[in-house]
Amino acid sequence: MPKKKLRCGFTTGTAAAAATKAALQSILRPSPPATVRIEFLTAGSIDIPVHRLERLSATMARATVIKDAGDDPDVTHRAEIGATVTVTEPATSSVEALRIVIRGGKGVGRITRPGLELPPGEPAINSGPRRMIRRAVRQVVGPDAPPLTIDVEIFVPQGEALARQTLNARLGIVGGLSILGTTGIVKPMSHEAYTATIRSALSVARASGREQVAMTTGRRSERHAQQHLSGWTDDQFVQIGDYFQFALSTAGEMGFQGIVMAVFFGKAVKMAMGVPHTHAARSSLVLDQLGDWTAALTGRPGLADRVRDANTARQAFELLGAYPTVIARVGQGIVEHAEAFAGRTLKVRSLIFGYQGGLMFDSDA
């Protein structure tokens, strides 16, 4: 059976540009648009339906569109994203250029910490979306536009609630969502948003003067790491998901001195094998390697066969509870590959948690 082709979507930045274009067209053109065309920052364009459109006065209008993430899992999928646009003429004839002002309204986060693409105090509307918004404005006013000020306020009605499902607060973005997108397109499973979040989290930690961070694969492993590293601050904990190589190479580029990898056993084995993206590793290959280590370190081929035949890494872990040398082999493998992925000399410490949360291995112990 042929594999279903996954559907692409568009970013929050594209949605913000579309809402801006629709609102501005309703002010400057005779008929309100039902759809607007937005050009991506790379190649191509997309026609986006207008969800709501309200002309508030002769010089002000508000429009929204519904963000479509395609087949990519995304907390902002189906979120309403809008723009309130106000057009004013200059008070004096000395002003000759078009002026575009971009602001953040309700539901758009505000940056409070250094280390992100924009400085503290700015709305969390990244440079890519700002370029798209400006280009959409210029397309509406045309190349021969008279001197005007176009004030664009981007808003997300449910942005504050949606932001609670993201890591924005950890990054120092308060009050709502970030308006993001480097290309304008959301490609299914492209992982662009996740890797951008990892990079931002590391950048915030570095800008705050942190020399060390703890990397976990999700909220559960992070909670255990926070209990074990009780003196560490929130911005020192970075959730990397499956992006083992990316996270370590980025940390190396940014000059961190130390990394703690705090993971459960299933991810730990994949990391110990040097798998760059831990979601992609086939479980049979992982268990085969774990079985080989078990045979070499315990001298018990029957046990090794049971490890290879286990249904999951969790089941294998239960078989190995009485064999700390195998667990230690996994922990040391994490250190070896993490240091290699970092591409420079830094200290890596590995922590492996059992599935009930107990610490089963500490490379510094």
Image (cartoon, rainbow, N blue to C red):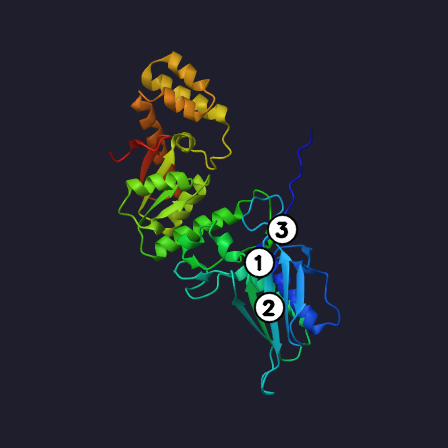
Going from the N terminus, do you reach mark 2 or mark 3 first? 3
Residue lying at 38% horizontally and 38% vertically, measured from the top left:
221
- The answer to which image quadrant residue 259 occupies is top left
Mark 1 → mark 2, Cα distance in angstroms: 15 Å
- Crowdedness of circle 1 by 10 Å Cα count: few (<14), some, many (20+)? many
Q: Would you name the residue on which mark 2 appears?
A: 84
Going from the N terminus, do you reach mark 1 or mark 2 first? 1
Q: How many marks?
A: 3
Between 217 and 274, the one nearer to me in the picture? 217
Q: Position of residue 7 (x, y in %)?
A: 65, 44
Instruction: Judge whether 294 appears above or below 247 on screen.
Output: above
Q: Would you name the residue on which mark 3 appears?
A: 68
Instruction: Judge whether 206 appears above or below 363 on screen.
Output: below
Residue lying at 56% horizontally and 44% vertically, measured from the top left:
73
Q: State yes or no: discs 1 and 2 in contact (Cβ < 8 Å).
A: no
What numbered label is drawn on residue 342? Answer: none
Q: State yes or no: discs 2 and 3 in contact (Cβ < 8 Å).
A: no
In the image, taking residue 124 as reference, residue 257 lies left or right, namely left
Going from the N terminus, do you reach mark 3 or mark 1 first? 1
Residue 347 makes an appearance in the image: no
Q: Position of residue 189 (x, y in %)?
A: 57, 42
